[in-house]
């Protein structure tokens, strides 16, 4: 069973859907399993990382994240906290999540704080990410 397979329930509220997806996101990240990680994204999804790199499509998202997890993030662990989620139109959610990343090879003892924006789309009875944006939060603001 893939980590995101529990996201096919249609009887969940936006916060529950986002929390389940966040749990699967963290599990995949922390196991450095980029195939399961990218299964949380629709095939035509986009992802903008903290340095502004736009990745388009599941294949490109997986390629960049797999390379990062083979290098800089090979020992990293991630935590996510859902700040809020709401359905903006039927079948489309917008969510904000705070993240805490430890184990970045550039600063192994440090912690990086970011804020994610996820747009989730219900397609073929499954919620997946259709767009993601990750923004660094400078330590002076945390």
Image (cartoon, rainbow, N blue to C red):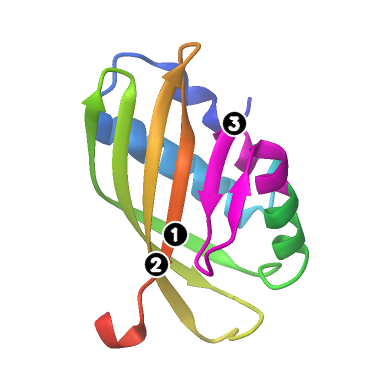
Q: Position of residue 34 (x, y in %)?
A: 69, 47
Q: Nearer the viewer, residue 54 or 11?
A: 54
Disc 2 secondary structure class:
strand
Residue 49: percent from left, percent from top = 53, 60
Measure the C-alpha gap from mark 3 to mark 1.
Answer: 18 Å
Secondary element at image label 3: strand
Q: Nearer the viewer, mark 3 or mark 1?
A: 3
Q: Secondary structure at mark 1?
A: strand
Mark closer to the chain start, 1 or 2:
2
Residue plotted at (33% across, 53% down): 97
Q: Which residue is mark 3?
A: 44
Q: Residues within 10 Å of mark 2 (few under 14, many from 20)?
A: some
How far separated are the C-alphas under marks 1 and 2? 7 Å
- In the displayed structure, 122 sits above or below 128; it is above
Q: Residue at x 40, y 32 (%)?
A: 120
Residue at x 50% of width, y 85% of height? 110
Task: Give yes or no for residue 32 being in the magenta stretch.
Answer: no
Vertical arrangement, residue 64 with respect to residue 101, above or below: above
Instruction: Name the N-terminal-most of marks 2 and 3.
Output: 3
Q: Is 51 on the left or on the right of 139, as rendered?
A: right
Return the residue at label 2: 114
Locate residue 17, reporting x and y percent: 34, 30
Residue at 70 percent of width and 45 percent of height: 60
Range of residues picked out in magenta: 37-62
Q: CA distance from mark 2 to mark 3?
A: 24 Å
Q: Which residue bears the numbered disc 1?
A: 134
Where does the C terminus fall, quadrant-wise? Answer: bottom left
Q: Give the crowd class for mark 3: few <14, some 14-19, many >=20 residues within 10 Å.
A: few
Q: Quadrant of residue 20?
A: top left
Contact between labelled residues 2 and 1, with CB atoms less than 8 Å apart? yes
């Amino acid at each position: 069973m893939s980590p995101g397979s529990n996201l096919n329930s249609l009887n969940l509220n936006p916060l529950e859907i986002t929390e389940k997806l966040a749990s699967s996101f963290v599990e995949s990240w922390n196991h450095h399993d980029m195939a399961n990680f990218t299964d949380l994204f629709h095939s035509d999804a986009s992802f903008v990382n903290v340095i502004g790199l736009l990745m388009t499509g599941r294949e490109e998202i997986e390629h960049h994240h797999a390379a990062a997890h083979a290098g800089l993030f090979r020992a990293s662990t991630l935590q996510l906290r859902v700040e809020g989620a709401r359905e903006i139109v039927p079948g489309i959610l917008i969510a904000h999540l705070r993240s805490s990343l430890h184990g970045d090879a550039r600063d192994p003892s440090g912690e990086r704080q970011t804020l994610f924006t996820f747009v989730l789309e219900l397609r073929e009875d499954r919620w997946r990410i259709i767009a993601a944006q990750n923004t660094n939060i400078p330590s002076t603001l945390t």
